[in-house]
């Protein structure tokens, strides 16, 4: 099994941190406040999953060294700061066709071809599945606003009342702010690691922020949040 979900107790500090981030990031005034039902930590167990974790950590290391112009052999400084200011915890919503997460015992991804959630958990993200007409190119989209990620969630199983959102470690690195649409691009400009869509408050056209990375190694699922609203 590539991954398994580890159910967390509400008393767990990570549960409380993830729940707080999720609820605090629910910004849409027209959406009722959600109720978190369960949070699972993602255990990446298979050799392929472990390899992805290693590639993700290596990608974060390179992005950090480049971003801060640090001597790559300055291990002390890197160990104290890598992941602090170039990796963010961001939300992603997608389609779920099964009942993964509906109970503490439903912890194994399904094999349905139309279940995008389980596909991400088993095989990680793939930027090539992005729609070609997405505003900021063919990449992997996530947001610091949980209620925005909620826009993309579909729960199609007839016997579920819940929604499931992914919380991810995202190597934002040096990000290029985009104030207008950039449909069709397949990567950030040279010297950048990601693209950030500017909000109206920042001079752009988005109501809420979003971040796009173009390399699967730049993003890794951290946890699964099950909720209802």
Image (cartoon, rainbow, N blue to C red):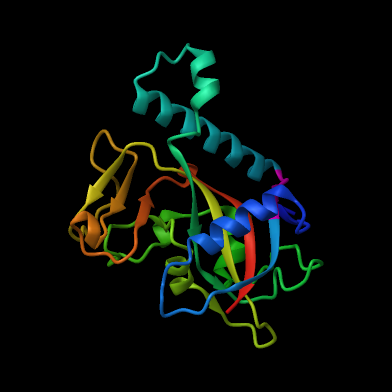
Q: Is residue 108 left or right of residue 83?
A: right
Q: Is residue 13 left or right of residue 178?
A: right
Number of dots carrying numbers: 0
Q: Is residue 142 left or right of residue 198?
A: right
Q: In the rendered view, tell whether residue 37 sits above or below residue 10.
A: below
Q: In the rendered view, tell whether residue 32 sits above or below residue 14.
A: below
Extreme residue toward the bottom, this view: 158
Q: Is residue 158 left or right of residue 178?
A: right
- Report the span colored magenta: 41-46
Is residue 151 something one can see in this rendering? yes
Q: Residue at 37% of width from left, 48% of height from top?
A: 214
Please say whether residue 86 is one of the residues in the magenta stretch.
no
Q: In the rendered view, tell whether residue 3 sits above or below residue 103.
A: above
The answer to which image quadrant residue 143 occupies is bottom left
Dominant SS of magenta comes to strand
Quarter holding the C terminus?
A: bottom right
Pick whichever, 218 or 84, lies toward us: 84
The answer to which image quadrant residue 46 occupies is top right
Q: Position of residue 159 (x, y in %)?
A: 70, 86
Q: Position of residue 117 (x, y in %)?
A: 58, 66
Is residue 121 something one can see in this rendering? no
Q: Position of residue 172 (x, y in %)?
A: 40, 42
Q: Residue at 41% of width from left, 80% of height from top?
A: 30
Pick whichever, 183 or 76, lies toward us: 76
Q: Position of residue 203 (x, y in %)?
A: 18, 56
Quarter holding the N terminus?
A: bottom right
Please say whether residue 43 is one of the residues in the magenta stretch.
yes
Pick whichever, 152 or 202, lies toward us: 202
């Amino acid at each position: 099994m590539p991954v398994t979900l580890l159910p967390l107790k509400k008393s767990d500090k990570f549960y409380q941190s993830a729940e707080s981030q999720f609820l605090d990031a629910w910004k849409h005034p027209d959406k009722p406040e959600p109720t978190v039902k369960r949070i699972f930590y993602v255990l990446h167990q298979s050799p392929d999953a472990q390899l992805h974790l290693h590639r993700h950590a290596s990608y974060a290391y390179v992005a950090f060294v480049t971003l801060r112009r640090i001597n790559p052999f300055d291990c002390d400084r890197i160990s104290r700061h890598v992941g602090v200011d170039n990796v963010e915890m961001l939300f992603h919503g997608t389609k779920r066709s099964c009942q993964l997460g509906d109970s503490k015992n439903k912890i194994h991804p399904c094999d349905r071809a139309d279940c995008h959630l389980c596909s991400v958990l088993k095989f990680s993200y793939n930027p090539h599945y992005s729609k070609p007409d997405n505003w900021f190119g063919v990449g992997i989209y996530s947001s610091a606003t949980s209620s925005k990620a909620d826009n993309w969630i579909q729960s199609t199983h007839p016997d579920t009342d819940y929604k499931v959102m992914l919380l991810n470690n995202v190597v934002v690195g040096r990000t290029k702010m985009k104030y207008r649409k950039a449909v069709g691009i397949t990567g950030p400009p040279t010297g950048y690691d990601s693209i950030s869509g500017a909000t109206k408050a920042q001079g752009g056209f988005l109501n809420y922020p979003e971040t796009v990375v173009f390399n699967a190694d730049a993003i890794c699922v951290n946890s699964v949040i099950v909720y209802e609203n």
